[in-house]
Image (tube, rainbow, N blue to C red):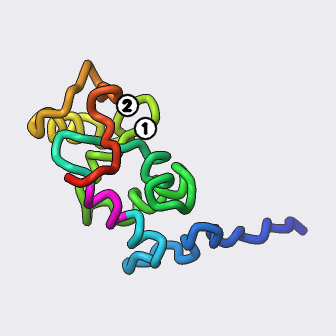
Amino acid sequence: MVRRPTPRPATVSAGLGVRGGTTPTPYARTVLDAVDLIPRGKVLTYGDVAELTGRGTGRTVGTVMSRHGRQVPWWRVVQASGRPAEPHVQEALDRLRREGCPVVGEVVDLDRARWDGSSR
């Protein structure tokens, strides 16, 4: 008899306890609200967004963005390397360039483009 592993529940540590849900959790709503504040031509890393919200990690922010990111300017959140996440790298880079964000090759110049979280 083959025992199947018990499915692991979604993490609840950052409020991501609903898999496949269409309504953002309170944590997800906080992340989306933070991303919505990033000004045109500026970016934050996934970790920056977690720090700005005071909850979660870059990974949990990435999970929120993969589920609900189309509700906000998702292209303004990049990896710690400055590269947008797959599979939308080119679309994100095109949008960022149109906004005047400094892009070199396939990465954002984080020294110049990282938003400091101050008012727009």
Q: Can residue 37 be seen in this view?
A: yes
Coordinates of residue 39 in the picture (x, y in percent): 20, 49
For the point 41% across and 42% down, the residue is 45
The kind of secondary structure element at disc 1 is: loop
Residue at x 54% of width, y 70% of height: 16
> Left or right of 99: which side holds 35?
right
Q: Nearer the viewer, residue 95 or 2?
A: 95
Q: Where is residue 14 in the image (x, y as percent from the top left)?
A: 58, 67
Give the quarter of the image for residue 37.
Answer: bottom left
Magenta range: 32-37
Q: Which residue is drawn at 15% across and 41% down?
A: 95
| Other-residue count near label 1 (Cα within 10 Å), few / some / many at <14 / 14–19 / ≥20 | some
**The one of 89 and 56 positioned closer to us in this rendering:** 56
Give the quadrant of residue 68.
bottom left
Residue type at tag 2: Gly
Residue lying farthest front? 118
Q: Where is residue 74 in the image (x, y as percent from the top left)?
A: 28, 52
Mark 2 surroundings: few (<14), some (14-19) or many (≥20) residues within 10 A: many
Is disc 2 in contact with disc 1, using a CB cutoff of under 8 Å?
yes
Q: Mark 1 points at which residue?
A: 79
- As drawn, the residue found furthest toward the left would be 98
Q: Is residue 78 above or below residue 112?
A: below
For the residue labelled by badge 2, is the local secondary structure a helix, a strand or a loop? loop
Residue 94 in the magenta stretch? The answer is: no
Q: Distance between the residues labelled 2 and 1?
A: 5 Å
Q: Name the residue under label 2.
A: 82
Residue at far top of view: 105
Query: In the figure, residue 92 lies in which quadrant?
Result: top left
Instruction: Tell me which amino acid carries mark 1.
Output: Gln
Q: Residue at coordinates 36% horizontally, 44% vertically from top-left?
A: 44
Quarter that holds the N terminus:
bottom right
